[in-house]
Amino acid sequence: MRHLVLVPSELEASYLQDLPLEIEIIGIGPVEAALSAYELFQKRKPSLAFLTGFAGAYPQTDLAVGDVVVATCERFVDFGRFYATHFVSFPEHIPSTDYCPLAHMFTEKLIYILEINGFNPQGGPLATVCAATYDAKRARFIAEKFQVLAENMEGFAVGRAARRSKVFLLEVRVISNSLSEPEKEWEIEKAGKRLREVWECLAREWK
């Protein structure tokens, strides 16, 4: 069985070459990802799809490079009102949303498969940002304000496109960098190798 797997860029796709997957590159960031994902869902009409790639671990999560995270929801943490000292959501009378649930029966199945195959995944909320965090203070603020494990730039957008298209979305990512040391170079090779191992497992085990 070939799975519809969405990845942000050619970089993630390069680690999944030759696996029995239907890989689609959707672009980096919430705008490109939302447009591409929605078009794909309308054209392909899948009942289930995966979003995968890399993520940056927030401080105080104990996540390390190569660890696997599964999103139970996405928070759009760049959406609201930023002040010099704090951040707040838009007022209730302004229609808006910064939360997208991703927990369903297939999420539990994904975590179970990864657990029994030794990946020790952490399931929990992830953050979608418009710009990758290179400031430790900002990283700590986001982690504490939204109680999220790691950040990416596409999850909320693709999640919203999936809900509108009535598609079950699963998001599994591999940690490529720690936001407690934001200036440290991302360990792409290590994360990419782990990403391939994850998908070798899922291509084999997911039925």
Image (cartoon, helix red, strand yellow):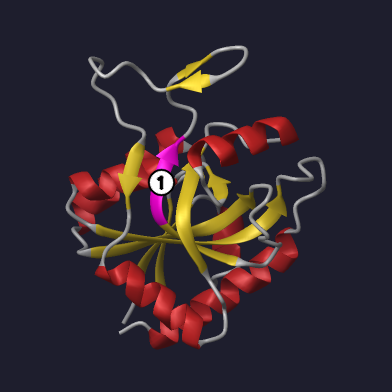
Instruction: Reply above or below: 186 against 129.
Output: below
Q: Is residue 112 visible?
A: yes
Question: Does the magenta portion include 119?
Answer: no
Q: In this picture, is 68 found above or below 71?
A: below
In the rendered structure, does residue 73 fall within the stretch colored magenta?
Answer: yes
Find residue 122 and report its horizontal and vertical position in percent: 52, 66
* In the depicted structure, whether residue 89 falls above or below residue 187: above
Residue drawn at 30 percent across, 84 percent down: 207
Q: Which of 153 and 91 is in front in this view?
A: 91
The spot of residue 5 in percent (x, y) is: 40, 64
Task: Name the residue furthest top.
Answer: 84
Q: In this view, does 93 lie above or below 76?
A: above
Q: Left or right of 21: which side holds 146?
A: right
Tell which of 81 and 28 is nearer to you: 81
Q: Is residue 36 visible?
A: no
The prevailing secondary structure element of the residues shown in magenta is: strand
Asked which quadrant contains residue 83, the reply is top right
Q: Nearer the viewer, residue 26 or 193?
A: 193
Binning the other alpha carbons within 10 Å of mark 1 as few (below 14), some (14 to 19) or many (20 upward) gives many
Start and end of the magenta stretch? 72-76
113 left or right of 188 in image: left
The image shows residue 202 at horizontal and vertical percentages of 44, 79
- The one of 113 and 18 positioned closer to us in this rendering: 113
Amino acid under disc 1: Glu
Instruction: Tell me what residue is drawn at x 64 percent, y 52 percent.
Output: 57
On screen, residue 108 versus residue 182, left or right, reads: left
Q: Residue at x 22, y 58 (%)?
A: 44
At numbered mark 1, what does the secondary structure look like: helix, strand or loop?
A: strand
Write down the residue under mark 1: 74
Give me the residue at 34% from left, 72% from top: 108
Give the x, y percent position of residue 100.
32, 44
